[in-house]
Image (cartoon, rainbow, N blue to C red):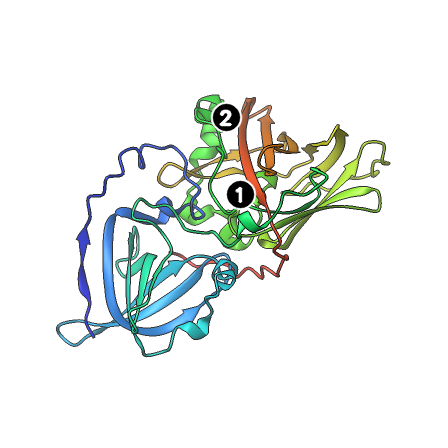
Amino acid sequence: MRRVLPTIWMLAIAGVFTARIAYPHHGFAVHYDLADQVRIEGRVHEVSLRNPHSVIRILVSGESGDDVIWTCETQAGSILKRKGITASRFGIGEPIIITGSHARRNPHGCEVGSIEFANGEMLTLRSTAGRARVEVNNVSSVSPQGSRTVFGTWLRDSFSGAPVTPGFLDLLTDAGRAASASYIGSRDDPTQKCSPVNPFRAWIAPGAPTVIRERNGHIEIQHEFMDTTRIIAMHGSPRPDRIQRSEMGYSTGRFDGQSLLIETTYFEAGVMITHVGEDGGVLHSEDLEMTEALSVTPDTGELKIQWAARDAQYFPQAITGELLLSPSELEIDRFDCVPQTAY
């Protein structure tokens, strides 16, 4: 049992680190350095396949005989489960080799790129270019839903679409910049405390299905991510006398043909965008207003989500983005998030 010392792989990834925002793995670049690749060879010490991230711990013996435990994070347990990977696949004490990106703040931490088991089997969870492999849905076997309505089960199993359009940082006011300057992603990311953050953030979780259904005169959007359910009060529904502010806000909706239009207000102050640059984010005030337009693209049968957010205090010009979700036959499971500790 031995550890192969970390090596630097100068990958052909021009532009990856100049991007101002990245969402491949809940802020992968915030915690891990793709340019600093490590190869860890040892024995399985402990495995915890959980949400939002799984953890594999490896016992490595140094040349002096001292044992070191490496802690390597990987994809959500729900994604691994749908790939057919369970904790029983990792035999405690069995040899294992993990190659991945070195943690920025933990000398014995990494994020899994690939796993080599004792029998020679290889499992790749992130490409060398940094793209997470999250596919859990055989989209080609799922026919577009016949009525072409937004109702049904949807899944983000690729990274198509632009979650946030470029240039959004230029829209911040001085107050918005000052508020956001206090946010440190590795410390303050609400998902580490099992929060869905806001409606936009709930949509972008890869590998976690969402069901849209009509129930009792309103629209229900059930995200597997963080076990979150949104109730959309349809146009004409009586308005509550008192509305409690929350991170997901209060939503009203109406149909424009087959498209579902949603307006959300009554947010509590919080985080608008969780991962910006190396360790930043964008905050919002209670003035946040969000609109979402949901429609099914006629050529592919995908669900298109176009969203815009305004905040009179922090970004009065709209921050916008677009996502594409595939139709899915998956059933929603319990997310059962476990709060994260420091990386």
Q: In this view, does 114 lie above or below 321?
A: below
Query: Whole-percent x and y of residue 187?
Result: 43, 49
Amino acid type shown at disc 2: Ala
Amino acid type shown at disc 1: Ile
- The part of the image, by quadrant, that contains residue 320 is top right
Q: Which residue appears at 30% of the width and 33% of the height?
A: 15
Viewed as shown, does residue 147 lie left or right of 65? Answer: right
Q: Residue 204 carries which label?
A: 1
Viewed as shown, does residue 335 lie left or right of 26? Answer: right
Q: Nearer the viewer, residue 298 or 276?
A: 298
Q: Nearer the viewer, residue 152 or 247?
A: 152
The N terminus lies in quadrant: bottom left
Viewed as shown, does residue 313 lie left or right of 56? Answer: right
Q: In this view, does 124 lie above or below 240?
A: below
Q: Nearer the viewer, residue 19 or 122?
A: 122
- The part of the image, by quadrant, that contains residue 236 is top right
Mark 2: give few (<14), some (14-19) or many (20+) Cα within 10 Å: few
Q: Mark 2 points at which residue?
A: 175
Disc tally is: 2
Q: Nearer the viewer, residue 277 or 88?
A: 88
Query: Whole-percent x and y of residue 130?
Result: 33, 46
